Image: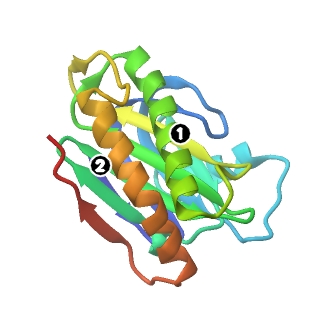
């Protein structure tokens, strides 16, 4: 996995087996993933066309999954835990919470699907713990991707994948939200040592 970012776009290069809940969501092989910042007042009836334009501008010509947010990539939080890397942008009041998680160890299709529930549950817990009285925003999205030979069959909260995912998301969402609200100017990384 290689990744790079600008103020407006995070690009993660694969190849990956991935699942996405964003526009055009699916479970399939993709060459790249990205998260792109749109203006806060942006509204378009064809977000798929915008994603296609962004992919082309970023030099992505194969299959991809893309997410949109009003949160700038300067507020990005990267959480690393063992074989997992989780990218979080977090804003509330009609922004969005986008989470892209990458496993360098292969996962079964059912584990990829189960990870969406694990991530969403951890996000809900994190938001409840902040005391903000919300559990999501209307446009939250998740991408879970993996590389390599299949190792992990499951991704529930007590598995090697799920425990790392849940902790990165539970700790990371409030930090990412705070970074956005404080106008941070460059992405940050946290490392979690989870057995």
Q: Is 167 situated above or below 25?
A: below
Tag on residue 120?
1
Name the residue at 46% across, 53% down. 59
Q: Is residue 82 above or below residue 151?
A: below
| Residue 11 image offset from top left, x and y in percent | 42, 55
Taking depth in this image into account, of 90 and 41 the one nearest to the observer is 90
Above or below — where is 100 with respect to 183? above
165 left or right of 7? Answer: left
Q: Position of residue 1 (x, y in %)?
A: 26, 45
Q: In this figure, which residue is indicated by the disc labeled 2?
A: 85
Disc 1 from disc 2: Cα separation: 16 Å
Q: Which residue is found at the position 63% from the left and 48% from the top?
A: 140
What is the x, y in percent for residue 15? 33, 34
- x, y percent for residue 22: 62, 40
Q: Quadrant of residue 82?
A: top left
The answer to the question of whether label 1 and label 2 lie on touching residues, with beta carbons closer than 8 A, is no
Please give the name of the residue rendered at 67% of the width and 66% of the height, measured from the top-left corner.
38
């Amino acid at each position: 996995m290689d990744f790079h970012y600008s103020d407006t776009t995070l690009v993660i290069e694969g190849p990956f087996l991935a699942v996405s809940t964003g526009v055009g969501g699916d479970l399939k092989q993709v060459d790249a993933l990205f998260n792109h910042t749109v203006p806060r007042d942006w509204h378009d009836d064809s977000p798929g066309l915008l994603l296609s334009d962004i992919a082309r501008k970023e030099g992505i010509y194969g299959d991809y999954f893309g997410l949109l947010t009003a949160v700038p990539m300067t507020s990005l939080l990267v959480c690393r835990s063992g074989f997992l890397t989780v990218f979080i942008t977090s804003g509330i009041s009609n922004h969005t919470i986008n989470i892209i998680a990458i496993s360098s160890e292969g996962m079964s299709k059912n584990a990829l699907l189960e990870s969406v529930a694990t991530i969403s549950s951890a996000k809900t817990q994190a938001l409840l713990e902040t005391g903000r009285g919300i559990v999501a925003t209307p446009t939250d999205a998740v991408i879970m991707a993996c590389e390599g030979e299949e190792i992990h069959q499951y991704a529930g909260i007590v598995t090697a994948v799920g425990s790392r995912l849940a902790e990165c998301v539970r700790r990371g969402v409030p930090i990412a939200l705070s970074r956005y609200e404080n106008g941070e100017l460059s992405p940050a990384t946290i490392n979690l040592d989870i057995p």
